[in-house]
Image: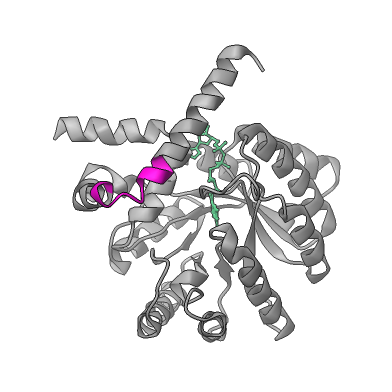
């Protein structure tokens, strides 16, 4: 890599760490929570209410895009609170169905009570899967991976095929996890990984994560099941297309997934070329941690916020 490119990679890695660490500061939280929506969080979040979100999902569908939505929230520590989360997801799923949207739901197990009790999160998710719509379990920090995969496997053993989950390329453990899941012909979303993880569990250097991503992607596409290629990285998207063409992998065996507000033109270009593209479109008042992860992925997004601040 050229020295300037190396410097750029190092600077971005430092900024990413800085932003993700600052996200925990209560002063930063107070400031961003108070002004964030006005200053541009709406670029990444489809509003604070279900009605606002439904309007966005419909607009995406009208453009030929599929969507999933998430009621933002994580780390729930009160069992009664998880009841409210399940009720909210029930309402979302029923609304998506009655409005005939090409959309489904992705959720976080810590929102359903994973930190309180694994059985509670399992039971809560099972109740939602009984509605029959597809639900994807997002992958959170590395301490939750084991329990998340355990819950995924149990649900599949119980006969639920309308569930998928996520693997993160930055974790050293992921190639092993993938091999152990493949006999289930799983529906997996592959991501690079969005959290601040310690070096003993995750590749600290982005080029290493990109290399592993490519290998995992090839293995998933070859092995069967359904692969959601969740990245905005041009090189990996082009690689997916070339690899699928070269190996006769049908277009209904994979899809591209991107985040709401990130590279919208690329999303539409892929639809025009005949690929399925799903836009992850979260909503809800608890948008703060989600927004901070989006800023960490691309520190230039912080400039976008600062510019809006200066404009007043
Ligand atoms: C649909 C979807 C679901 C996800 N689910 C999870 C999950 O369950 N668990 C998890 O840990 N992570 C999840 N992620 C986040 C993921 O781990 C990455 O942090 C994120 O996708 C950025 O990596 P990238 O693959 O786009 O590649 P990068 O190399 O980071 O980015 C490639 C290019 O995309 C553009 N880009 C990337 N991110 C942004 C951004 N935030 N704003 C503006 N431009 C950007 C830039 O042009 C950048 O150069 C998800 C991502 C997507 C798309």
Considering every residue shown, the one lying at the far right of the view is 247
Residue 224 in percent (x, y) is at 81, 60
Region in magenta? 19-28
Say if 87 sits above or below 229 in the image: below
Q: Is residue 101 rendered magenta in the image?
A: no
Task: Label the magenta part by its dominant secondary structure.
Answer: helix
| Quarter of the N terminus within the rendering | top right
Q: Nearer the viewer, residue 243 or 48?
A: 48
Considering every residue shown, the one lying at the far top of the view is 3
Q: How is the image coloured?
A: one colour
Residue 7 in percent (x, y) is at 54, 19
Say if 240 sits above or below 127 in the image: above
Residue 34 in percent (x, y) is at 19, 52
Say if 36 sits above or below 115 in the image: above
Q: Is residue 21 rendered magenta in the image?
A: yes
Q: Is residue 298 visible?
A: no
Q: Number of callouts in the render?
A: 0
Say if 173 sits above or below 97 in the image: above
Residue at 66 percent across and 80 percent down: it is 155
Considering every residue shown, the one lying at the far front of the view is 200
| Quarter of the C terminus within the rendering | top left
Residue at 22 percent across and 34 percent down: it is 308
Q: Is residue 174 left or right of residue 28?
A: right
Residue at 22 percent across and 52 percent down: it is 30
Q: Nearer the viewer, residue 240 or 17?
A: 17
Q: Is residue 240 visible?
A: yes
Residue at 47 percent across and 39 percent down: it is 17
Residue 156 in percent (x, y) is at 71, 78
Considering every residue shown, the one lying at the far left of the view is 312
């Amino acid at each position: 890599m050229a020295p300037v490119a190396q410097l750029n990679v190092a600077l971005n890695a430092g900024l990413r760490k800085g932003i993700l660490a600052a996200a925990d500061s209560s002063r930063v939280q107070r400031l961003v929570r108070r002004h964030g929506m006005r200053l541009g969080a709406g670029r990444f979040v489809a509003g604070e209410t279900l009605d606002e979100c439904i309007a966005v999902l419909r607009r995406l569908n009208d453009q030929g895009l599929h969507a999933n939505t998430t009621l933002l929230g994580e780390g729930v520590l009160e069992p009664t609170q998880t009841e409210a989360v399940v009720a909210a997801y029930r309402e979302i799923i029923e609304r998506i169905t009655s409005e005939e949207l090409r959309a489904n739901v992705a959720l976080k197990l810590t929102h359903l009570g994973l930190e309180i009790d694994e059985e509670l999160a399992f039971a809560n998710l099972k109740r939602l899967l009984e509605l029959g719509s597809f639900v994807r379990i997002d992958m959170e920090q590395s301490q939750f991976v084991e329990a998340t995969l355990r819950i995924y496997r149990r649900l599949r053993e119980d006969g639920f095929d309308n569930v998928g989950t996520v693997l993160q390329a930055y974790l050293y453990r992921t190639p092993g996890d993938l091999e152990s899941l493949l006999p289930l012909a799983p529906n997996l979303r592959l991501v690079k990984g969005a959290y601040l993880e310690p070096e003993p569990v995750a590749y600290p250097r982005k080029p290493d994560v990109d290399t592993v991503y490519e290998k995992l992607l090839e293995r998933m596409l070859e092995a069967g099941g359904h692969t959601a290629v969740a990245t905005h990285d041009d090189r990996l998207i082009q690689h997916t297309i070339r690899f699928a063409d070269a190996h006769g992998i049908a277009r209904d065996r994979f899809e591209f997934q991107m985040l709401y507000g990130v590279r919208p033109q690329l999303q539409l270009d892929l639809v025009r070329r005949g690929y399925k593209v799903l836009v992850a479109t979260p909503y809800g008042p608890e948008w703060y941690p989600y927004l901070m992860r989006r800023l960490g992925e691309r520190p230039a997004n912080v400039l976008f916020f600062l510019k809006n601040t200066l404009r007043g």
